[in-house]
Image (tube, rainbow, N blue to C red):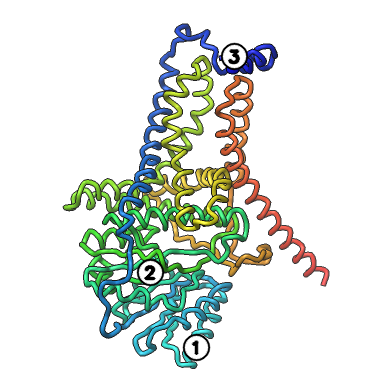
Amino acid sequence: MVATLLPLAFLAANSTGSRIMRGLFDDTFAGVHQLGWFDWAILIPYFTILGVLSIYGMHRYDIIRTYFKYRKKATGEPLRRFAQLPPVTIQLPIYNERYVIERLIDEITRVEYPRELLQIQVLDDSTDDTAPFAEALVERYRALGFPIEYHHRANREGYKAGALQAGLETATGEFVAIFDADFVPPQDFLTRTIHHFADASVGVVQTRWSYLNRDYNILTEVEAMLLDGHFILEHGARSRAGYFFNFNGTAGILRRKMIDDAGGWQHDTLTEDSDLSYRAQLKGWRFVYVPGLDCPSELPVEMHGFQVQQSRWAKGLTQCAMKLLPSICRAKLSRRVKIEAFLHLTPNISYPLMMVVSALMLPVMIVRFYMGIWQMVFIDLPLIMAAFWSISAFYVVAQRELYPKNWKRSVFLLPVLMAVGVALTVVNTRAVLEALLGIRTGFVRTAKYAVGDRQVNLETRKYRRKSGLLPYIEIAIGTYFVAMIAFAIESYNFFSIPFLLLFVAGYYWAGMGTLYQEQQSWMRQRRLELKTVRS
């Protein structure tokens, strides 16, 4: 008892320390301050939204539980094998991929499979010098005896989905493997996946993504962690438990009959892969996930490029939810499968909800100024554990499963991971609202630069997109959180400061980082113009 009281007595003797202790534990105003209608108008939406976010947080815990519960049902070797290999078509959908197309075609021609049973389609929608370059590459490999074809469309109708569907018109394969331009498939990809289709109920075999430039910078390392959580825990849990899960649009192989039976590739969403996946599984087709086979790919190395990619996925998945959830609810499926499908298709609603929570946070701090610490313990702490601690558990467990010997580094990267999540809030909120309001936008692909672990001067690369007002909005919101930190310090609400700092770091990183990269690109362009004038 004395040992406990001594530190408190020391703090009480110090004027600053005593003010801090009063700020944390003083209940002088308990029973005196009464919440008015305005206070309740702030608090009810705030805690309601935190409750909704907690549901998705608890779902992460359930994914972890499901992953380990069905661990023994992980995909192994195919139970049956083809006596005679079937014909396969490999589709390579590309659009303005000048930096990676040569690597892609070179690696595809190394894939092990009988040439007489193989067809390679380069489906090119390019509008720049990628088109003639890719056509020349195809002709060169075709002259060497490879079964490769070049198909160029004069328009991008349907974008990637349209290109894939157009390619099916001349496809000769019973099965179709698809690789995006930045992927480097292993040579044994087909021999390790094709035999799963000896089971006539299997419609898709999806493999795990790995990353050529995981260690390029801190952003790519965090991106890899985010995707590892999806491929290790989400795909692992859903595939083992028999829930619906999605083909990821690349690094997988599909049964042609399944594509046709499900209604073909459709382009009314930006995630044609998830759309086809759910339509096919509603038809009864079974999907197989093979985590032991990984396909290296390239991660976006700039914050805005990453934001563009994630916003497309967020909007597309929300569009799929609106399109498919009515059919899923009516289908003769177990309640557990339906709930999992709903939670899988709707998680991006958390982004606009987080924007509302962010706007309410400062008035809530003011309204709750007279509330004691115990309300935080019994009300706030459980919600924080459900909504935010689940993120830490989810991604650390995924890293431990994937890298059992050096997973501990991921613990130290968790604050960065959460800051990156914050950096996606504005752009993904816009994407989700566009989906909910039915606003159609084009398919914006993620720029690839053929980078590995080595640094590349991105100022010399084209395909970089302009960010518009986005970084200025992010900086403004980050400044709003700086004001909240100032208020938290003034009101001795110290428990909230680490949480608020994550928001400041995330918004400032996104906004200032993007502006810096664009300013560097502008300066390089200006130097080139001056050099041209002088010469």
User: Disc 2 on helix, strand or loop?
Assistant: strand
Instruction: Tell whether label 3 touches label 2 (CB within 8 Å).
Output: no
Q: Residue at x 60, y 61 (%)?
A: 464
- Does the rendering let one see residue 528? yes
Q: Quadrant of residue 257?
A: bottom left
Q: Position of residue 411 (x, y in %)?
A: 55, 46
- The nearer-to-camera label among 2 and 3 is 3
Query: How many numbered circles does the render carry?
Result: 3
Q: Position of residue 305 (x, y in %)?
A: 56, 57
The quadrant in which the N terminus is found is: top right
Q: Could you tell which of marks 2 and 3 lies nearer the N-terminus?
A: 3
Q: Quadrant of residue 272?
A: bottom left
The amino acid sitting under disc 3 is: Val
Secondary structure category for the residue under label 1:
helix
Q: Which amino acid type is marked by label 1?
A: Tyr
Residue farthest to the right, as pictured? 534
Q: Nearer the viewer, mark 1 or mark 3?
A: 3
Q: Tell me what residue is drawn at x 45 percent, y 67 percent.
A: 294
**Residue 2 got which mark?**
3
Q: Nearer the viewer, mark 1 or mark 2?
A: 2
Which of the two residues, 248 or 78, is positioned nearer the viewer here? 78
Name the residue tied to disc 2: 252
Look at the numbered discs 1 and 2 and tell me whether their residues touch, using CB distance below 8 Å.
no
Mark 1 closeness class: few <14, some 14–19, many ≥20 residues within 10 Å: some
Q: CA distance from mark 2 to mark 3?
A: 65 Å
Mark 1 and mark 3 lie on one chain; the one further toward the N terminus is: 3
